Amino acid sequence: MKQERDAGREIWTIGRLLDVTGQYFRRKGLDSPRLDAELLLCKVLGCERLKLFLDYTRPLDPGEVDAYRELVRRRAAGEPAAHITGKKEFFSLLFEVNHDVLIPRPDTELLVELALDHLRTLKLEAPRILDIGAGSGCIAIALAKHLPTARIVALDCSPAALAVARRNAEAHGVESQITWLEGHAPQAIPGGEFDVIVSNPPYISEAEYRELDPGVRDHEPGTALLGGNDGLDIIRCLLRPEALRLTSHGVAWIEFGWLQGPAVLELALAAGWPGVVIRKDLGGRDRCIELRSRPLPAPAGLVLERDAPPVLAALQTLDAPTADLTSGESP
Ligand SMILES: C[S@@+](CC[C@H](N)C(=O)[O-])C[C@H]1O[C@@H](n2cnc3c(N)ncnc32)[C@H](O)[C@@H]1O
């Protein structure tokens, strides 16, 4: 009976199924239609993406097509591909994700790159790193993988998120380098000084949250997204100098929303941070603030007056990590 039913069915090769699904997802307005089509098929076939291309002309059996159709239906209904597959790549590492954690975003890789650059320059024997709002553990684990002697403390207020982070650390073999702490920043930030502090805190305002893509709002945890009325509640707390204790050569990077740069800069200056730079992501958008407990020597032309209006405009164009905002001297 089943054989008879299958006999009349259309033959789908891997390549044809991907083409048709990619077009369908594109019409649905998904951000990465072809990639999502591939990731879902990998899930059904239990293979790596490369295998799809090696077997491009392979016909799929009806059971595989049916299983794929169900995943396509879920994706088209707004469920993130990472939740359907249970995985997301970050900094070229694969992380388990579920409804308890934010799905790691490519923009956040900037924090890892900046921290790695800084620590490679310092050449410390065993750098101390703090990650505030660890989520899936993606930042802490990426740093641990690249800095085998680093000692990392990773804090999150969600026990469910920490459970995912611990599993990810085990999967990547770095659990001995990371201490997971449950609690709310800033109160739960551990004592002692750190060579690097990184944080991707929740920073979405209540108004933005209401307008958020339902694929994000309905599937990712509100505690990972919502930063209060203007989105800056947690960032405001973190920017208090007593919250972030850095060694004399230490640097902190805090991610924020791409339109929040001017507001975050004002907060950092008002809090009295002596060395402050706004860093941009690959798309050229303000993405994180860099804080030092000592001002950087600034090259000619980049010494900015603390309260001068051009500060914001000048910072928008800065690629180099070198703006001393406290000297009070004009360029
Ligand atoms: C935007 S997610 C970032 C997760 C992960 N670091 C990443 O970049 O994908 C923010 C995380 O901060 C946690 N969080 C929110 N408020 C917090 C607080 N006051 N103290 C500690 N963690 C907090 C949330 O549970 C969530 O896991």
Image: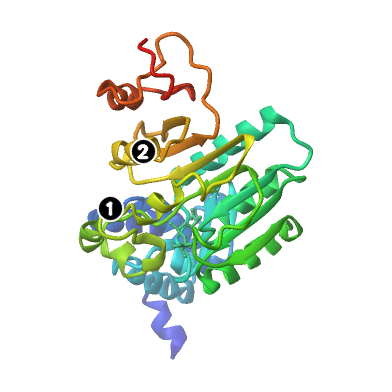
- State the SS at label 1: helix
Q: Which residue is mark 2?
A: 270
Q: Nearer the viewer, residue 83 or 56?
A: 83
Q: Earlier in the sequence, mark 1 or mark 2?
A: 1
Q: Nearer the viewer, residue 272 or 108?
A: 272
Q: Nearer the viewer, mark 1 or mark 2?
A: 2
Q: Is residue 291 above or below residue 14?
A: above
Q: Which disc number belongs to residue 252?
A: none
Percent x, y of residue 305: 35, 20
Q: Nearer the viewer, residue 185 or 156?
A: 185
Q: Amino acid at mark 2?
A: Ala
- State the SS at label 2: helix
Residue that protrudes farthest toward the bottom in the picture: 1
Residue at image location 59% in from the left, 38% down from the top = 115
Q: Is residue 53 left or right of residue 212?
A: right
Q: Which residue is mark 1?
A: 26
